[in-house]
Amino acid sequence: MKFFMPSRVIFTPSSLDYPLGREIYNFFQNEPVEIIKATSRNAARYIPGTTPAEKYANSKRTILITTNTNKKLDICRPSADYQFSLVSNCPGNCEYCYLQTTQGTKPYIKVFVNLEDIFDVIKQHIKQDETITTFEAASLGDPLSLEHITGSIAKTIEFFSGLEKGRLRVVTKFNNVDSLLNLKHNKHTRFRISINTNYVLNNFEHNTGSMDERIEALVKLANADYPIGFLVAPLMVYNNWKKEYYELFEIIKNHLGSDLCQKEITFELIQHRFTAVAKDLILQRFPKTQLDMEEENRSLKWGRFGRFKYVYPKEQAEEIKEYLSSLIQERFPKADIKYFT
Ligand code: SF4
């Protein structure tokens, strides 16, 4: 897919104190983008739009270059011990995106340039015993979508390659991986791609890599000796869902080929869920959405962010889990199904 180019880039004053902030500033000098200097507090003012849909669309074409001052990392169960951010948000427009409710009415993209500070915080969170501590880089956004601008995943891979007891985990819907293939990584970074059926990709994911592009990117990473995996999410039940998930795993098997299918591959299975607040926002931003958000078809579950979420009823969730697990185990002998949630 074509590399993302924003319409406007806003630099906070402190971002230009860091080498990466200045590199990104120079990168945009020759690009057809509006460059603005403003504080984080004022950034949203520069994003045009009157309706929720316009504000959303313009925000997704805006990057704020800033610093990450977070000193305490959040837990990221079940995918990793902790999560940290090189970016937040992404240029994709997935209708179901779990970030819909966390980024305000103008969900612009943030890029954090104080990498050394971020790495120091990571080091401080590594457990002091003999066990491995894992860190997820993509729970608040998709850093690979911006790698051609930031180069920060490459630097983070190299940082983790030197950590004895820290491991990096990255998940993506983009195929921006060529700059990562010759890095020294020591197998300390596991890449997963987020995949789904054609129905989900075609109806609910926009401005992300196609299925073929994502799988081809993962094959390149596997051939560069990175540990790999798949995040199958959000799992949805609709007419023909069983047939389409069957086809999905056939496509993956054929793309990977028999050698890669024999590798240890992780799978993470996440069913579709939504909150009442998210439903409201999604309907404003995507008035014609076909997402199934009928509360009566779902069960209520208490979420760790202090809100009830709607998930599939227990028996249906069990059916999804059993069916997907069998599809995986039949095709990937060393599959490690990490969790279903
Ligand atoms: S790619 Fe991920 S972070 Fe970006 S909009 Fe889609 S779900 Fe959200």
Image (spheres, rainbow, N blue to C red):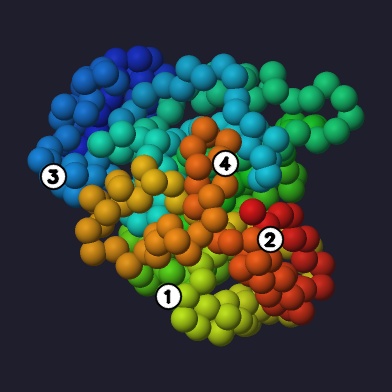
Mark with earlier residue (1, 4): 1
**Residue on which disc 4 sits:** 302
Mark with earlier residue (1, 3): 3
Q: Is mark 1 within 8 Å of ligand 1?
A: no
Q: Position of residue 337 (x, y in %)?
A: 74, 60
Q: In 3D space, how far apart are the residues under numbered discs 2 and 4 (Cα atoms)?
A: 24 Å
- Do residues under tags 3 and 2 come within 8 Å of each other at their CB atoms? no
Mark yes or no: residue 177 visible: no
Q: Quadrant of residue 263?
A: bottom right
Q: Position of residue 282 (x, y in %)?
A: 31, 51
Q: In 3D space, how far apart are the residues under numbered discs 3 and 2 (Cα atoms)?
A: 39 Å
Q: In 3D space, how far apart are the residues under numbered discs 4 and 3 (Cα atoms)?
A: 32 Å
Instruction: Identify residue type, mark 1.
Output: Tyr
**Residue on which disc 3 sits:** 51
- Looking at the picture, does residue 150 appear above or below residue 192? above
Residue that appears at 45% across and 51% down: 274
Left or right: 315, with 67 as reference point: right
Mark with earlier residue (4, 3): 3
Q: In 3D space, how far apart are the residues under numbered discs 2 and 1 (Cα atoms)?
A: 20 Å
